[in-house]
Image: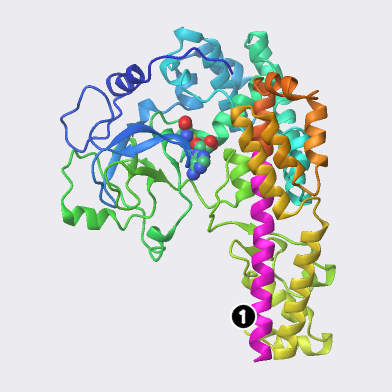
Amino acid sequence: MEHEQGSFESFLTWTSSHLGISDSTTTNHSQHSLAHSLCVSIFPHSGGRGLGAVRDLKKGELILKVPKSALLTSESIMQEDKKLCLAVNRHSSLSSVQILTVCLLYEVGKGKTSRWHPYLVHLPQSYDLLAMFGEFEKQALQVDEAMWVTEKAVQKAKSEWKEALALMEDLIFKPQLLTFKAWVWAAATISSRTLHIPWDEAGCLCPIGDLFNYDASGEELSGIENVTALSNGDKSIVVDEDQIDFYSQRLTDGGFEEDSNAYCFYARTNYKKGDQVLLCYGTYTNLELLEHYGFLLQENPNDKIFIPLEPAMYTSTSWSKESLYIHHDGKPSFALLAALRLWATPHNKRRSVGHLAYSGSQLSADNEIIIMKWLLKTCDAVLKSMPTSIEDDNLLMNALDSTISQDFITFMKIAKLMSSRDEIYTFLEAHNITDALSFSEMILSKKVRSSMERWKLAVLWRLRYKKVLVDCISYCNRVLDSFMR
Ligand SMILES: C[S@@+](CC[C@H](N)C(=O)[O-])C[C@H]1O[C@@H](n2cnc3c(N)ncnc32)[C@H](O)[C@@H]1O
């Protein structure tokens, strides 16, 4: 989506003066909303544009408050526009996410006359969510499950767009806003930027609040599962030590608070001045992060991978299919171990050892050796069945990085070190790149650059997948060694 660029500084002033957004815990507001706790900065290796701490921040401290009236929701947009409201009511079969997508495009269509124009012009112009992956990038994921999730995401986006077309035509959208391209841009904006609100499943777009980049770690919040989410109330406060201890017990680092009628954000840990301040949007695997947000993490404590199991393994226990996976560090999940242990037990003995398996205990040395050998063999077979090796993938990442300087010679030099170059040739052919000249011309094209960005994400994803398989093999070897001693 093309947007004219406004000045970011004037956007920040607008969020304070028009929307009442503040990062100050005192009543004394500065000329723009961010100055007391947060500032907008670029963090090249963890999310790009994001929010940094302008002073040391204490865990649990209120760092940003966005009034309800500043949240962009279907309700807030429709309240201002009777025509939109009436049209939406005529299309009651659409989901709340489809309605918010239409509302967002509707506001974009208003251009400068939209109340939200200063916010809209600073939204990203493109995204790399799975729904935007083309056939080539989908294949580059190499794993059936990931390709299937991508296919489903593309199909879902297409069918939701088709279903919403009648409403958009009813509203006499400009032709460029009726396109699938415009739809996926709006749907990706909503998928990657909305925050949860209790009154609309689609969530809300939250100016400034949607600039927090993601942190997966949940350690700071662990051990407080039984604490009820606390409410701050609408107080302008200078936080003292006791209050910080009190707030550090809260369950979430951001949420809508009825008492203050605002979205409130709290520091999820202690931050030093200059650190990036992060928000945990939820618990996601790398594939889910790619699907909903268009990025993935090198170290993701919530990552998990699935390997093909034999049908009898799924039926050996009552654990769900989703619980039979390998953790990010290569360790099999509790349920996978239990299912394998029972599967490797003769049918007539399963009943007597069931309680042991379900409590996570080993059944016998022989049983443990059988399952570790099976797991090791399966992970190894999966690795070998993949079209490229880890070494090739690392070389490919280096080659793709060399394209930043449009350096075809280096790109091909690195590519020649790879044992399998089919993927590279497919890409070059698809974009009619035959030599250094066409390479440097094509590399400037927005379409080719986007495709390369998504290709890189796919390679990064499959590298993480392969790394988990390798770690699982090491884990199995360690367990097997322990039986040999
Ligand atoms: C809510 S927005 C955060 C602000 C965003 N960086 C911006 O410039 O508007 C979420 C998006 O930020 C990026 N992002 C957030 N956390 C990230 C991280 N840890 N690593 C890489 N990208 C991240 C992703 O593109 C994601 O879809």
Q: Residue drawn at (31%, 37%), measured in percent from left and top?
A: 64
Q: Image quadrant for the N terminus?
A: top right
Residue 78 is a magenta residue: no
Q: Which quarter of the figure has residue 338? A: bottom right
Q: Quadrant of the C terminus?
A: bottom right
First to last magenta residue range:
456-485
* 56, above or below 91, in the image: below
- Secondary structure at badge 1 equals loop
The picture places residue 19, in percent across and down from the top left corner, at 33, 23
Relative to the observer, which residue lies in front, 201 or 485?
Answer: 485
In the image, what residue type sits under mark 1? Answer: Gly
Does residue 129 show up? Answer: no
Place residue 380 in its image quadrant.
Answer: bottom right
Please indicate whether residue 49 sits to the left or right of residue 436 in the image: left
458 in the magenta segment: yes
Vertical order, 117 against 332 (above or below): above
Q: Which residue is mark 1?
A: 360
Please tell me whether residue 338 is drawn above or below residue 422 in the rendered image.
below
